[in-house]
Amino acid sequence: MATKPNTAWGQPISPPVGPKNGRKRIRCKLDSVSDVKAEACKLYRLVRSGEIDASEAGKLAYLLQIIAKLAETSDLEARLAELETGS
């Protein structure tokens, strides 16, 4: 009998990252576009120094691009709501 995959895409769900499975959890502030820009600059420096592979950095940069767009949209949404309420 075959087991069912844990997700709709057929891939198993990876375990949570944290001290229990031996991997360190990394936190960085990504609340604004400037925060995301700072993280992208760190990523660029890591690639230039050879500490991270360029293909891995490309994947992370793509995710940063999505996060930046979401932060920008969220900011615009908040500003529009403020204008609509007249505050």
Image: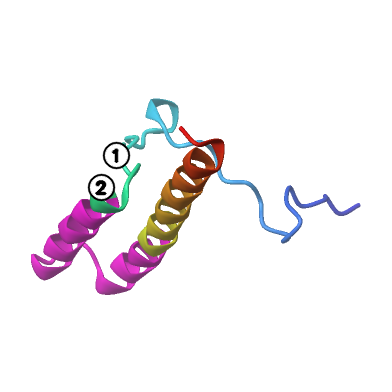
Residue most extreme to the left: 49
The kind of residue on which mark 2 rests is: Asp
- Mark 1, secondary structure of its residue: loop
Using residue 41 as the reference point, say whether residue 2 is left or right of it: right
Residue nearest the viewer, comparing 53 with 78: 78
Residue at the image point whose x is 56% and y is 45% from the top = 14
Residue 51 can be seen, yes or no: no
- The residue that disc 2 covers is 35
- The residue that disc 1 covers is 29
User: Badges 2 and 1: C-beta atoms under 8 Å apart?
Assistant: yes
Residue at the image point whose x is 43% and y is 60% from the top = 69
- Vertical arrangement, residue 23 with respect to residue 45, above or below: above
Q: Position of residue 21 (x, y in %)?
A: 44, 32
Q: Position of residue 57 (x, y in %)?
A: 29, 66
The kind of residue on which mark 1 rests is: Lys
In the image, the segment drawn in magenta is: 36-63
Residue most extreme to the top: 20
Residue nearest the viewer, comparing 7 with 45: 45
Q: Position of residue 29 (x, y in %)?
A: 29, 39
Residue at the image point whose x is 73% and y is 51% from the top = 7
- Vertical arrangement, residue 34 with respect to residue 58, above or below: above
Spatial distance from mark 2 to mark 1, Cα to Cα?
6 Å
Residue 30 can be seen, yes or no: yes
Residue at the image point whose x is 43% and y is 26% from the top = 20
